[in-house]
Amino acid sequence: MIAAVLFILFIALMLAGVPIGIALGLGATAAIAMANVDTANFGLLAVPQNFYATLTKYPLLALPMFVLVGSIFDRSGVAQRLINLAIALVGRGPGMLPVVAIAVAMFLGGISGSGPANAAAVGGVMIAAMARAGYPASFSASVIGAAASTDILIPPSIALIIYSVLTPGASVPALFAAGMLPGVLIGLALMIPAVWLSRRHGLGAREAEQARPALLVSLREAFWGLTAPILILGGMRLGWFTPTEAAAVAVGYGLLIGMAIHKTIGVRDLLPIFREAAELSAVILMVIGLASIFAYALSTLSIIDPIAKAILSSGISSSAALACIVILLLIVGMFLDGISIFLIFVPLLTPFMRAFQWDPVWFGILMTMMVAVGQFTPPMAVNLMVSCKMAKVPIDQTFKWVWWFVLAVLIAVTAVVIFPGLALWLPKALGY
Amino acid sequence: MENDKPVAWYRRADDAIGAWLLAALLVITLVNVFVRYFTDQSFAWTEELSSFLMLVMCLAGSASAITRDSHIRVEFFFEAADPGRRAGFEKFSTLANALFFFGLGLLSAMMAWDEFRFGDTSPAIGLPKWWYSIWLPIFCAILCTRSLQRFQQIQRPHGQAAEKDAP
């Protein structure tokens, strides 16, 4: 009964357009009050206590720092130089520019931690370049929206930090290491339909006529961008910095590149950059804080344990349950953004994880891959929205292309389901 | 800001608090790294300070986000609705916001009061806990006010388009 109130209130408020965090908070507060009618203050002091305790967790500081990294590298001029280098390396020809876009999005994934920031950085340069080479804007937007989704798997990743905060037994370094190979796998999987569609539809016919940048010059220009992931990931791996510190160092490095070397960021740009990053972090942190009240309600009102028992006694097999979860996440991914998916579904899916003894790191990577698909599956697709806005095409024009990319990533997801080693080998080899 | 209308002072204040706190968090974290490498000291107490500043940054940034209407919501039904119904949804959503932050403010004031009464001190620095927690009800009051101000803007004809700038 109380569980029903919790879910119905939450879902109804959410569908009415109330911010997701507020819907979670109101639903949970009502449920806690109903469950504790006999207690002093209806047990509601747990609401501010959970909110306060969650938002003052020190490891969570990595999140605003990585948001800031994204905002700064987005404007640092690094993307342009990496793209020149990539073109110099792979050459010109039909289907090559989409491959370059995907490769650069993957590389930037090693610096920033959020998909939309990546789509903005790559899209800012690639959409005009692809238009000059004769690719239709709807195709470019699809490629870039899909490519940017590798960002939340390739470390560092804001999504994995959130998952780590929610899941005991899945540390940030282990998740970062585990996301690497699946992220690369998704990138490679995206390249296949990108080249195939270009060839089949004769896209980018004028690409071969465009000049190929000189290799050594572009290498020297791209040097600063190339060293950034080495500093961030290498610094964490060698134990120089914690994830939060690595992000702070990356911010300093990005500001150095943007302000002193490429001169794309002026002193007057700083306040808007910090303002934007602070607001975006606040929006994410707010949902995390309010979702902790929801998670508290779920666990104290004994909603989770009966579900877990029901799962085990139903006799459903581990792989059938997993298939259901993947399909469920694919569907909710079309309507919910990634952060909300984690905050709502990690507490709900934890009983499955425990019941079937799935590895929490592997399961986190799987969920993140599904969120990555959701980031470019219409109608609600944050990355695609960014790339479409930049390409000035309505999102429905991308439908004829984007499904091929969705299919490619789903094949990669299947590979990680069948071979958990794809995710778990690297963290084990690195000793996390 | 894309529009030429002067921006209300409270919006600039919310924005500035968020931006400067983020900058402060960055500087504290970087100083920590340097101090650790060049001396043998470690600043454990900065963790407590940073955590608190992050909370305040989140609250101030949320106030900006309410004014700009950039909190995460399910946009699918929202976008599909016709303008009249959408305004209704939006009004309902700002009122739900206001109600929630009013309640959270009340409850967090009780929490801060308890901490004051019982003289709880923080684990790392040993400061009275209510020095930190008192900011929660204060900012909840601000967030509640921002929601109502937003409600007023939607009520006013043409006010909505002018205030809703880039996400």
Image: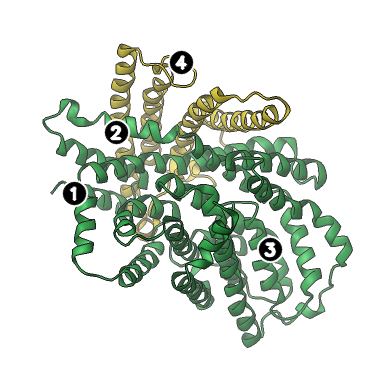
User: Dot 3 falls on which chain?
Assistant: A
Q: Where is residue B40, by image quadrant?
A: top right
User: Residue at the location (65% across, 52% down)?
Assistant: A111
Say which residue label 3 marks.
A104
User: Dot 2 falls on which chain?
Assistant: A
Q: Is residue A11 visible to the viewer in this orientation of the structure?
A: yes
Say which residue label 2 marks.
A47
Task: Tell me the SS state at disc 4.
Answer: loop
Q: Give the percent coordinates (x, y) of residue B26.
A: 62, 33
Chain identifier, colour yellow:
B
Q: Residues within 10 Å of mark 4 (few under 14, many from 20)?
A: few
Q: CA distance from mark 1 to mark 2?
A: 17 Å
User: Residue at the location (33% across, 17% down)?
Assistant: B115
Q: Is residue A225 left or right of residue B65?
A: right
Q: CA distance from mark 2 to mark 3?
A: 44 Å
Q: Closer to the N terminus: mark 1 or mark 2?
A: 1
